[in-house]
Image: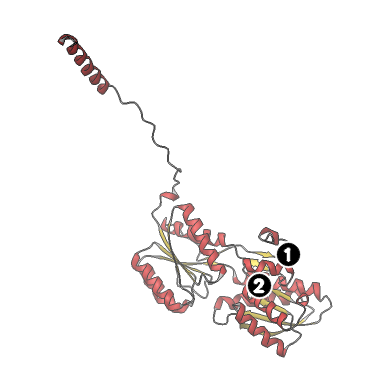
Amino acid sequence: MRKPIKVILYITIAAILAFGLASCRPAAETPAAAPAEEASAEEARDITIATITYSNEIEWFFILDQNYRDVAAELGIELVQVDAEMDPQTQVDLIEQMTQRGVDAILISPVDPQVIRAAVQDALDAGIIVLIQGQERETVPWSTANFGYDEAQMGTLTGEIAAAGVKDKFPDATELKVAVLGDPGWASSIIRMDGAKQALMDNLPDVNIDFVLDHVLGVTIETATNVIESALQQHPDLRTVVGINDDAAIGAVGAMQSAGIDISEACIAGAGNNRGTWPYIDRGEILGSVDLNHRGTAEVAINAVVSLLDGEEVPEMMYIDMIKVTPENLDNWYTGE
């Protein structure tokens, strides 16, 4: 049965009035969608940093790259990471690519500082911040700034570890033969190994130390093994080795074991606190290492870029704290797994 036209009209008018009133009311406040994560001032920054490592085949640089990523992510900074693969010309090419890309800063672990110098200057001329890792300012003064370790202090810590081992194992020693492994072509290595030598002499004042190998190339397990094997042929009583890094120390252990030497008689120390070194320290085959604080290195470098972009000054040489790694504190890093 059809409704009367009047009723239909009333209903229609009522609907129109209701719609009109609703459209005239202030809109109800719609709760704003909560951000997934509150952005800090740093996270709002529009900064791009390129990192060009020496080689990710070397554990220390691989771990450093991971820490660069962590710190950059926390600060909301875009990171471009490339690897020079131990080739200085490749590193030059990568610096040129990052310069053309127009990044804000480049962090470089040089393969050969002198080879990359011209490319670095081009980047600086383009207004890019260039920070050099692992080189003292006295040897590389042509970057925006350098960051890394006090090479003399690192060597001192390594030498102190070796000297403590000599005192413990050979308390009555009056003569000592020592091998110092480094990289003669790397100026900062010379400073580091001189620090190790001085620490041995300072801590063993009554011992006549004969440095049978001095700054000889031994930066990898293979090169260190070969060098110490040859040295043992001329100096079969060689037992003390201070290495530029942990790979040098591991190579020295292998060389002595191959020569049939009881490794408990050896006093071998390295630097780097690499994961692969921990079992050697745990077994007493290497007396200790030096923790090079990857996280601290990444923080110092990236925070320096932020400060420089804010118009602030940073030291031309920025040092990172280091500590000795010995069996007494090894469990801070190594669980035996």
Q: Nearer the viewer, residue 182 or 249?
A: 249
Is residue 233 shown above or below 267?
below
Can you see residue 287? Answer: yes
Q: Residue at x 39, y 32 (%)?
A: 31
Q: Residue at x 40, y 71 (%)?
A: 95
Label 2, label 1: how many angstroms apart (C-alpha)?
Answer: 14 Å
Dot label at residue 270: 2
Q: Residues within 10 Å of mark 2 (few under 14, many from 20)?
A: many
Q: Position of residue 46 (x, y in %)?
A: 38, 54
Q: Position of residue 280 (x, y in %)?
A: 69, 70
Q: Position of residue 292 (x, y in %)?
A: 60, 65
Residue 139 horizontal side relative to residue 290, left or right:
left
Amino acid type shown at disc 1: Pro
Q: Secondary structure at mark 1?
A: loop
Q: Residue at x 78, y 77 (%)?
A: 265
- Residue positioned most to the right: 172
Q: Residues within 10 Å of mark 1 (few under 14, many from 20)?
A: some
Dot label at residue 153: none
Is residue 188 shown above or below 1?
below
Quadrant where the C terminus sits is bottom right
Residue occupied by mark 1: 327
Instruction: Tell me the quarter of the picture where residue 174 sits.
Output: bottom right
Q: Residue at x 27, y 21 (%)?
A: 22
Q: Position of residue 7 (x, y in %)?
A: 19, 10
Instruction: Tell me the quarter of the picture where residue 269 sits.
Output: bottom right
Quadrant where the N terminus sits is top left
Amino acid type shown at disc 2: Gly
Q: Nearer the viewer, residue 15 or 120?
A: 15
| Marker count (numbered) | 2
**Between disc 2 and disc 1, whose residue precedes?**
2
- Residue positioned most to the bottom: 234
